[in-house]
Image: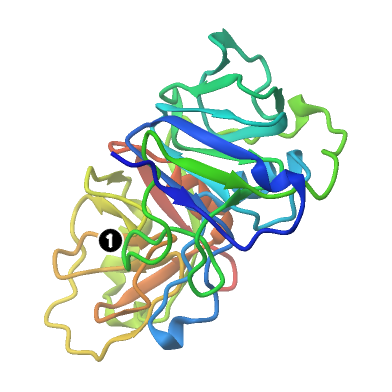
Amino acid sequence: MTAMLHTRTRPDTAETTARLHIIAAGMYTTIQDSGRPGLAHLGIGACGPADRGAAALANRLVGNPEGTAVLENLLGGLSFTATVPRYVSVTGAAAEVRVDGRIVAEPQRLYLRAGQRISVARPTLGLRVCVAVAGGVAGARVFSSCATDSLSGLGPAPVRAGDTLELGVPVADPPYARLELIGRSLPTGVIDLGFHWGPRHYMFTEADTRALISTVWSVGVDSNRVGVRLSGPPLYIGAVHMPSEGMPLGAIQVPPSGEPIVFLADHPVTGGYPVIGVVTESDLDLLAQAPPGSRVSFSPLAGT
């Protein structure tokens, strides 16, 4: 199979020869940058990293501007080499990282020499690993973004073994930081999600709004970058007749089954089922790291 090459307009500099060679891509690895915000009126979702905090941290640690394209990997199994020496950061889910077979003590930031092989194992905690490389990954841009949208199909195809990905030019040296102080702890018990009520919570009975916040929900196996499906005692919405309306990131939508869906990065821009509340973006990062079977609760924020 011919290796796929993601390209972009390249400046006249020797750094444009910098590339990543993908040896193994794992279950599902995509390129994600800041996405396509502000285009919902055209039917185009924002997309971007599922765990935005992990992507922002990874970019910051290698000196990239926020929103630079990274690799988002599901459940490890990612392995690659670079043709030039670069700083690399691995954040998000807790996973063992090796360089040429040796375990890396601090994978949040490491210096990868040309030709060295970096490998990311299956996470021991969390679901998605974010990998940033100094200069960023250069992918084919669609509507000014090289983010892969799993719902619409916009952006580059998911990364495959044998792909060659171009790297951009580093713009800054990595900042000094005490790496042991920058990590974010992932929850090991029930993941408590802060949310705001509305816009359609009035369509539910008081018993159901109480049930939403008193139930410990379970993450379903059919969850993905579009949304996290939760299982538990169903809420009752009866016969709903409402026109489709805009769907925000973090929307807690309740379909006829009565079991909530929380929308993630690749969510649809419209929907016809009521939204009982909206989860905060910071807590969405935690939910994006929740594997099937994880337990989730909802806590309404003051003033909502």
Count of numbered tags: 1
Q: Is residue 84 above or below residue 63?
A: above
Whether residue 135 is visible to the viewer of this picture, yes or no, is: no
Residue closest to the eye, 40 or 159? 159
Q: Residues within 10 Å of mark 1 (few under 14, many from 20)?
A: many
Colour scheme employed for the rendering of this structure: rainbow
Quadrant showing the N terminus: top left
Residue closest to the eye, 248 or 72? 72
Residue that badge 1 annotates: 260
Residue closest to the eye, 10 or 33? 10
Image side of residue 93 versus residue 257, left or right: right
Image side of residue 169 versus residue 199, left or right: right
Secondary structure at numbered mark 1: loop
User: Residue 27 location, x and y as percent?
Assistant: 32, 35
Residue at 35% across, 81% down: 200
User: Residue 292 location, x and y as percent?
Assistant: 29, 38
- In the picture, residue 11 is in which quadrant? bottom right
Q: Is residue 251 above or below residue 245?
A: above
Image side of residue 36 versus residue 105, left or right: left
User: Residue 300 location, x and y as percent?
Assistant: 49, 62
The amino acid pointed to by label 1 is Pro
Q: Is residue 120 above or below residue 216?
A: above
Residue at 74% across, 39% down: 62
Whether residue 1 is visible to the viewer of this picture, yes or no, is: yes
Residue at 68% across, 48% down: 16
- In the picture, residue 282 is in which quadrant? bottom right
